[in-house]
Amino acid sequence: MNVVFCKIRRKRKFAVQSICISLFLCIFSICVIKSLSWISDKHNNQFERIIRVSHFCEDFKDTQFETVPYNIVNLRIIVIVYNRATSLRRLLDSLNKAHYFGDKIALHVWIDRSKNGTIDSNTYGAASDFTFQHGQYYVHNQTCHVGIYGQWMGTWYPKSNSSEFAVILEDDLTVSPYFYKWLKLVHMKYDNYSNVNGYSLQGISIKHGATQSGYLEVNETHKIFLYPVLGTWGFSPNNRNWRAFSDWYLEVRRDPKFRPLVPGIHPSVWYKKQLAKGHQDHMWSMWFIYYAWMNRELTVYSNFKGHKGLTVNWKEHGLHYSENDSKRSPDPLLVDWKPEYEDLPERPVIIDVNGRERWRPE
Ligand SMILES: *[C@@H]1O[C@H](CO)[C@@H](O)[C@H](O)[C@H]1NC(C)=O
Ligand SMILES: *[C@@H]1O[C@H](CO)[C@@H](O)[C@H](O)[C@H]1NC(C)=O
Ligand SMILES: *[C@@H]1O[C@H](CO)[C@@H](O)[C@H](O)[C@H]1NC(C)=O
Ligand SMILES: *[C@@H]1O[C@H](CO)[C@@H](O)[C@H](O)[C@H]1NC(C)=O
Ligand SMILES: *[C@@H]1O[C@H](CO)[C@@H](O)[C@H](O)[C@H]1NC(C)=O
Ligand SMILES: *[C@@H]1O[C@H](CO)[C@@H](O)[C@H](O)[C@H]1NC(C)=O
């Protein structure tokens, strides 16, 4: 009897001790995690990041910037624009027509400056006259000419604990009314796949293999597919991956000799051509493609019938297209939703840069 009682007391003492120890460990690790996220979020001023990723803003490095308001939202839409008032109006109107299911949405328009420092007043007018019917709306003038690098890589850097996701849209796109419905589905389904770096909204993409040409044709039985090269006609990054990519870029860009070239693909050829012309600041995506290749990551694409996309690219004269591209008829857009689109595979097919099916990364 006595022995049993003693044992129980000893057990209880032991239990109290272990509860104390685990409580301490718990509080300690919460403190560590909090301070780590505080350290990384301290450098979260968006204007400051933009200046750091851009090649053009040396004179502004020591500026004190206003902070961008970042309330908790479900979706953050980042529109990047440069001197294209008409296109911007068309994109913003399509964003108003999309379905958001009462979710919390923020829309940011980032207007780049010209190299001589001016903001195009028509573009600013188009942005400031617009009323967003589905949530918060912000218009930001860039501090200096930040170029396509600053616009793409600096305008979104989610907090480490944030559950929002973003979509980055160039001004010459329009969106499908269902773009957010699809994004919600795929984020929910694939955000915890460690090899998925984001979601592309375009319905048409070329094959990127060095010896291939033509468009990707994926068997209709696949509702979505994974592909090694991102599509930039509307891209929604995976948060964890985008933070890691942004941090990596700021590190490697310090070495002026570093070239993000991936063997065996067309984008490397284009990048080299841009380099030869002194235009390496035109192709930010090469860095993303390289990062994905290095880490064996893939991008999710939709595969709707007839190449219908969640965006249309109007291919306007600018950095990426010549005058004649814009004369082609626009690509098809997804305007109807069917319940079968919601049945997404656990193990999506992988399409390689030559358009062939694979089930595991090379
Ligand atoms: C600045 O650049 C813009 C766009 O390139 C041009 O339209 C404008 O005339 C320039 N302004 C000055 C003062 O040079
Ligand atoms: C942005 O630029 C426009 C056009 O130059 C100007 O009218 C507006 O005041 C600027 N906004 C801010 C917040 O600087
Ligand atoms: C994230 O952390 C910040 C500060 O550390 C806090 O203010 C914010 O409420 C947190 N957000 C979420 C979604 O937990
Ligand atoms: C992702 O999460 C879901 C549901 O929580 C789980 O069923 C699935 O196995 C996870 N996938 C991976 C790759 O971790
Ligand atoms: C698509 O896949 C299905 C099922 O595997 C197959 O029966 C069909 O022949 C394929 N279609 C084409 C055009 O390859
Ligand atoms: C556009 O098309 C016209 C007529 O077909 C041609 O003369 C011109 O060289 C083309 N321009 C470019 C930039 O390809």
Image (cartoon, grey):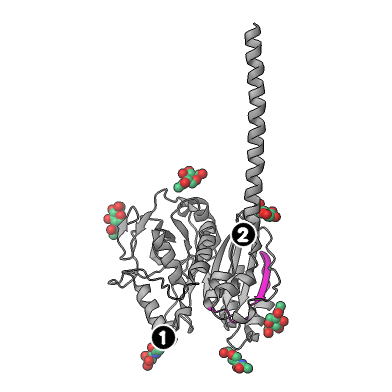
Left or right placement of residue 278 versus residue 176 in this view: left
> Is residue 141 shown in magenta?
yes
Q: Callout 1 environment at 10 Å: few (<14), some (14 to 19), or many (20+)?
A: few
User: Quadrant of residue 271 in the image?
Assistant: bottom left
> Is residue 17 shown in magenta?
no
62 and 198: which one is in front? 62
User: Quadrant of residue 110 in the image?
Assistant: bottom right
- For label 1, the residue is 277
In which quadrant will I find the C terminus? bottom left
Mark before the other along the chain sequence, 2 or 1: 2
273 and 25: which one is in front? 25
For residue 81, the mark is none
Residue type at mark 2: give it: Ser
> Could you say where residue 142 lies in the image, as x and y percent from the top left?
63, 78
Q: Nearer the viewer, mark 2 or mark 1?
A: 2
> Could you say where residue 290 lies in the image, as x and y percent from the top left?
41, 66
When the figure is inspected, residue 184 is found, relative to residue 311, above or below; the finding is: above
Q: Which residues are magenta?
A: 129-147
Left or right placement of residue 6 versus residue 235 in this view: right
When the figure is inspected, residue 9 is found, relative to residue 275, above or below; the finding is: above
Residue type at mark 1: give it: Lys
Question: Label 2 vs label 1: CA separation?
Answer: 37 Å
Q: Callout 2 environment at 10 Å: few (<14), some (14 to 19), or many (20+)?
A: few
> Could you say where residue 53 lies in the image, as x and y percent from the top left?
55, 73
Residue in view at x 63 percent, y 64 percent: 43
Judged from this view, the residue extending furthest toward the left is 211
For residue 40, the mark is 2
Q: In the rendered image, is residue 69 in sight? A: yes
> Could you say where residue 331 lies in the image, as x and y percent from the top left?
43, 73
Residue labelled 2 has its Cβ within 8 Å of some atom of ligand 3: no
Q: In the rendered image, is residue 203 in sight? A: no
